[in-house]
Image: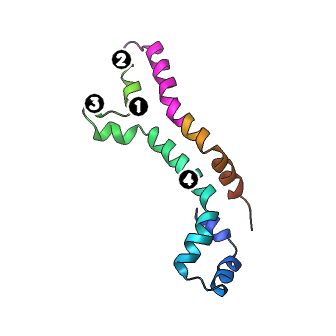
Amino acid sequence: MRQFVRALPIELEEAAIVDGANRWTIFWRVILPLLRAPLAALGILSFLAQWNNFFIPLIMLNSPNLFTVPLLLNEFRSEYTTQWTLMMAGGVIAVLPVLIIYIVGQRHFISGIAMTGLKA
């Protein structure tokens, strides 16, 4: 996000100032619409990171009613055996919300990633 904002041309802000816009108007009407793609990409990546988080919930949660999806999938493993059929079915179910979020934000995600490496 920082690199994307730094790559925005200062001329956009200067033109808005010449047109009589204050700082909030510049942010809400000029900069924020340009940040839509990177914000969508950041949102998808942040959701995915938290959805797949294993270590922190493992430390903090002690009730199976509060377990996250990765912790519940880990419950299918035991000391001597693993219930692979249940683990694979749970994996498919765990992927569905991430897939739906990605499909909804795909256009913004792709454009946000593509614009990340560009120099203005």
Which percent across, then down, holds residue 99?
56, 34
Look at label 2 and name its amino acid: Ser
Distance between the alpha carbons at the discs numbered 1 and 2: 17 Å
Distance between the alpha carbons at the discs numbered 3 and 4: 29 Å
Which percent across, then down, holds residue 37?
63, 55
Crowding at label 3, few (<14), some or many (≥20) Cα neighbours within 10 Å? few
Return the disc, 4 or 2, that comes first in the chain's sequence. Answer: 4
Which percent across, then down, holds residue 4?
64, 64
Q: Main secondary structure of the magenta part?
A: helix
Write down the region rendered in magenta. Answer: 80-98
Residue 79 location, quadrant: top left
State the residue in front, 86 or 74.
86
Give the number of the mark in front: 1 or 2.
1
The answer to the question of whether label 3 and label 2 lie on touching residues, with beta carbons closer than 8 A, is no
Is residue 33 positioned above or below 13 on the image? above
Residue on which the image places disc 3: 65
Is residue 33 positioned above or below 83 on the image? below
Residue on which the image places disc 2: 78
Crowding at label 1, few (<14), some or many (≥20) Cα neighbours within 10 Å? some
Whether the magenta-drawn stretch holds residue 83 is answered as: yes
Look at label 1 and name its amino acid: Val
Residue farthest along the front direction in this orientation: 20
Look at label 3 and name its amino acid: Asn
Q: Residue at x 64, y 64 (%)?
A: 34
